[in-house]
């Protein structure tokens, strides 16, 4: 029996901001793995994100299952970054009175 080794390229690429994107799309690894861990099948994910080929979704899920510790570390880092950005934005842009401001803007006809 002859055993051949197949090298598969996982369709992931990190952009300049350090965000990992799937295939040649703007769909993030975070998004795809979140859908998978919430119970979505590869086919359901493909339906939600039609720009990502089904085969690539299967490849990324397989990579996640084989490299779970590494991917989870990346995902935790991204969540921490998101919380920091959210905190900064909440400090800079108070949501206090936003409803009233939006209603006043609508009433005055401004966009």
Image (spheres, grey):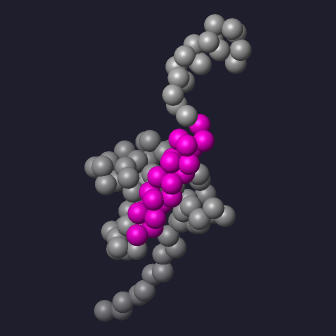
Question: Residue 12: where, in percent of width, then height?
Answer: 53, 65
Q: Quadrant of the N terminus?
A: bottom left
Question: Residue 3: where, in percent of width, then height?
Answer: 36, 89
Question: Residue 107: where, in percent of width, then height?
Answer: 63, 7
Please say whether residue 62 is one of the residues in the magenta stretch: no
Residue 53 seen by the camera: no
> Which residue does the image show at 43% across and 86% down from the upper left?
5
What range of the chain is rendered magenta?
Answer: 73-93
Q: Is residue 25 left or right of residue 33?
A: right
Residue 44 seen by the camera: yes
> Which residue does the image show at 59% across and 37% down from the upper left?
93
Question: Residue 75: where, in percent of width, then height?
Answer: 43, 62
> Which residue does the image show at 47% across and 52% down from the upper left?
83
Counting the numbered discs, the total is 0
Classified by dominant secondary structure, the portion drawn in magenta counts as helix
> Which residue does the image show at 28% across and 49% down from the upper left?
39
Q: Nearer the viewer, residue 56 or 67?
A: 67
């Amino acid at each position: 029996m002859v055993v051949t080794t197949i090298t598969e390229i996982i369709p992931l690429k990190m952009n300049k901001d350090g965000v990992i994107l799937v295939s040649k799309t703007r769909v993030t690894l975070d998004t795809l793995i979140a859908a998978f861990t919430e119970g979505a099948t590869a086919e359901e994910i493909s339906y939600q994100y039609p720009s990502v080929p089904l085969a690539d979704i299967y490849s990324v899920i397989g990579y996640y299952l084989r490299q779970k510790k590494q991917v989870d570390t990346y995902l935790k880092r991204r969540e921490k970054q998101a919380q920091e950005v959210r905190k900064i934005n909440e400090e800079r842009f108070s949501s206090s009175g936003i409803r009233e401001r939006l209603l006043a803007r609508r009433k005055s006809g401004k966009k």
